[in-house]
Amino acid sequence: MNYFEETKDFRLINLPTQLKSPTLIRVDINSTVVEGVLNEKSLRCKIYSNVLEFLSEYTGLIVVAHQGRKGEKDFLPLNQHFALIRKHLPLDIDFSFIPKNEIFTEETKKKIKALKEKEIILLDNIRYFDWETSYNPENSLYINFFKGLVNTCINDAIPVWHRAHTSIMALPKISRTYVGVRSTTELKILHEIDSVRDEDKAIVMGGKKFGKTEYILNIAKKMQVFTGGIPGQLLVKAKGYNLGPQNEEFLLKEASKKQFELAGELLKMNVEHPVDFILYEKGEVKRVELNELSESNGLIVDIGEETVDRYSEKLASKEVRIRAGPLGVFEKGFINGIKLTKRILGYGLVFVGGDTTQELVNEGLLDKIQSTGGQVLLSGGAFLHRLAGFNYPSLDEIIKQRTSLEI
């Protein structure tokens, strides 16, 4: 399905006639958190602050969002996000926050009914509620609370479109639902990438995981894949190298049996792995080649300079060059992924995902990427989901509105 074309009837292109107060909007301000503290340079908070400011000119907004997953260290209430977004918004916009215990109350209903232009309410982390991750339209507190209360809905949370979660799936059952302005832009870029020949595309995949097995296998059939982070280490391990005590132990803890098996399969495909790494050992940083790894007790923190040279040379011939996931521990200053990025700047460079794009912000490279013709997308796992050929459940629900609405 060509989602960019199929959602044409649900784009926001004439806001005064399309939006009616109050409007419920689902966004994704899920951001990097270190020791319980939200990154003050959160790109998602900044971008969605601009989106909310723009939309609030025409309608009062109720904003639904999440942060992290239950049981994980980055699972937090949204009060820090509220404070950061408040800094980005003009002072003439009335911006308020409703904590989790007060969301589904009569008092909140009154506040929502009274919403008008230039007024925005941010609701607390929607993942506090167990029903968020188990969508059931027949028994939904979310639908029952908002249906008849809001007049318009917007789904602008493309980073979670690969998940059939209640807060995005249920929107068309609450009210007429549009695809958000940011999400429409990212759909267009996905469509443009699809139109490029497979041999002219490549993706650099890093981070802590491959994502779903089907993602990387399907993507590797469509384009050349370069790896770093945990995926790169797994491929090196699958090729028979010993990564040294610390890294062997780390992989056993972080990677599943299925991921180890996947790495073996990928070695048979058009997939590249690092040829050297940067290790941190006893307070010292050093570059180590593959055949030297077993003799070192250092922890891998980045790809090496030879890998940067090798990857950049091969990527230079690609019309589309996608970066998905950090290649090193950029939070600690290990930024060979940034060095690689600088070498492949220009038209066709596409950055995806929260941590990958946050690396750009931290290193002051965001404006340079965009100024030289590159693209920076908020979608990470959702981007890979579609790139691998899978559908977006919540977008399918929006498209179904054609059968019940006059378009």
Image: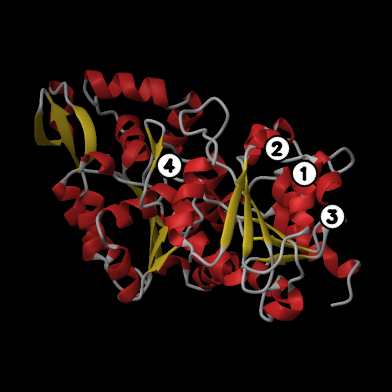
Residues tagged 2 and 1 counted as in contact (Cβ below 8 A): yes
Q: Which mark is residue 155?
A: none
Amino acid under disc 1: Glu
Q: Nearer the viewer, mark 2 or mark 3?
A: 2
Amino acid under disc 4: Leu
Closer to the chain start, of discs 2 and 3, is 2
Spot occupied by residue 324 in the image (x, y as percentages of width and height): 40, 52
Closer to us: 57 or 308:
57
Closer to us: 361 or 257:
361
Spot occupied by residue 270 in the image (x, y as percentages of width and height): 39, 52
Left or right of 83 in this view: 119? right
Real-space CA distance between mark 2 and mark 1, rounded to the nearest whole angstrom: 8 Å
Does residue 10 lie above or below 172 as drawn? below
Spot occupied by residue 9 in the image (x, y as percentages of width and height): 75, 76
- Quarter in which the C terminus is drawn: bottom right
Residues tagged 4 and 1 counted as in contact (Cβ below 8 A): no
Q: Nearer the viewer, mark 1 or mark 3?
A: 1
Residues tagged 3 and 4 counted as in contact (Cβ below 8 A): no
Left or right of 221 in this view: 147? right
The residue tagged 2 is 102
The residue tagged 3 is 173
Q: How many marks?
A: 4
Q: Secondary structure at mark 4?
A: helix
Residues tagged 1 and 3 counted as in contact (Cβ below 8 A): no
* Within-10-Å neighbours for mark 1: few <14, some 14–19, many 20+: few
Amino acid under disc 2: Glu
Residue sitting at 87 percent across and 37 percent down?
A: 139
The residue tagged 4 is 266
Residue sitting at 10 percent across and 34 percent down?
A: 285
